[in-house]
Structures are given as structure tokens and as C-alpha cells.
Image (tube, helix red, strand yellow):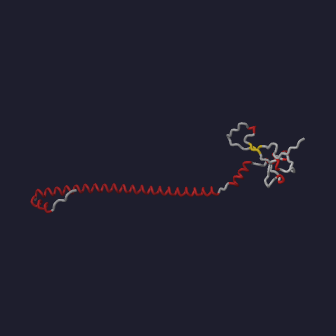
Amino acid sequence: MSTTHSYYPAASLPINMPQKPGYYQPHPHHGYGRVSVSPPEAPESVTTSGVPSYEPSATSSSYAGSASDYDSSASTAGVDLIDYMGDRLHGAFNPMPLDRSLAKQAQTSGELNAKHRELLELQALAQRRLAGARANFANGMRTAKEVQKDLQWTQKRVDALNDRAARKYPKEYKSAQSRYPAPVDY
């Protein structure tokens, strides 16, 4: 009987991995969706230069372990890969920059909302002022039309008085007209 020194288990048992709902698994009996267990760590006596090695040439002959020494069902029974990866991610992930950026985003959003409300208030104020200016302009236009009508009526009265004075007193009217000429209209 030949003795085989193997540092790897003859066959490692896979770990069941949870699947997402609706995930298509073509051959569920062929081991898809499973992860195999890594080989056992070599004991201290098997290390060379402080680094563990799994090559048979790098080990001493004092270790004569075989695949039967490694009970894969006992070592993988308590391993939950999701928890393990979650713990690793939790240890590697620093949430502080994310928290700071989230706080900064909330602060910026609040400032933006405040500016938006301020702009809406200013827009409402501008619309009220514009409505007031339009009312004042309309009132001014009515007043200007009334003044224009009054001036036209007054001009007609002055022209009528001048015509009557020119007819009734022609000599005095001519001398007054030469002494005080009418203004030139531009």
C-alpha cells in the first residue's frame, strides 16, 4: 500500500449560496451557486521562511496529514458566507465620508430650498409692484388724456376769442399782433 501525502482535502464540500428570487439555475444538482471551502492552513512546522506553503516540496517530512485529517463538514458548518462578507465589508468600509457628504447634501438642499422660497417671494413682490406700476401708468394716461382734452378746449376758446377780437377791433388787433408775435410752432 502506497502512502500519499496530500495537504489538500480529497474533495472539498461546497457551501450553499442563497440565490435571488427569479434567478435561473440550469442544473441545480451540478453544484452551481456553491462555493468550495479553501484548504486548511498548514501547521507552523510546515512553514518555510515564515510564509506558509502548500507545495509538498517545501514541507518537512514530519507532517504526514491526509485528507481524512481534514473534516470539511465540521469546519464549514458554522460558516455563513454572507455574514463573513458583510463583516469584511463592514470592516473595510468607512461610512464617515458618506455621512459627511450626506450631511452636506442635506445642508445644500436646505439652502437651495430657502433660496427658492426667497426667489418666489421676490417674484411675488415684483408682480405686485408691476401691477401697481401698471395701475399708476393707466391712471397717468387717463389724466394725460383729460389734460389734452382740456388744452384742446382751451385752445379752441382762445382761437375763437382771437377771431372775434380781429373782427371787432381789426386795427388794434394788428398792432398787438405786430408788437407781440405768436410763438412759432415746432
In this image, 169 relative to 41: left or right?
Answer: left
Residue, far bottom: 179
Residue, far front: 57
Residue 4 percent coordinates (x, y): 86, 44
Residue 120 percent coordinates (x, y): 47, 55
Along the line of sight, which residue is nearer the eye, 147 or 76?
A: 76
Residue, far top: 26
Q: Which residue is rendered at x = 68% and y = 40% of the image?
A: 23
Residue 170: name its quadrant.
bottom left
Along the line of sight, which residue is nearer the eye, 51 or 81?
A: 51
Residue, far right: 1
* 14 up-or-down from 115: above or below: above
Residue 35 percent coordinates (x, y): 75, 44
In this image, 56 relative to 155: left or right?
Answer: right
Along the line of sight, which residue is nearer the eye, 67 or 72?
A: 67
Q: Which residue is rendered at x = 72% and y = 42% of the image?
A: 33
> Number of labelled discs?
0
Residue 47 percent coordinates (x, y): 81, 53
Q: Which residue is rendered at x = 76% and y = 44% of the image?
A: 36
For the C terminus, the quadrant is bottom left
Q: Which residue is rendered at x = 32% and y = 57% of the image?
A: 140
Residue 100: name its quadrant.
bottom right
For the N terminus, the quadrant is top right
* 25 up-or-down from 172: above or below: above
Residue 122: name its quadrant.
bottom left
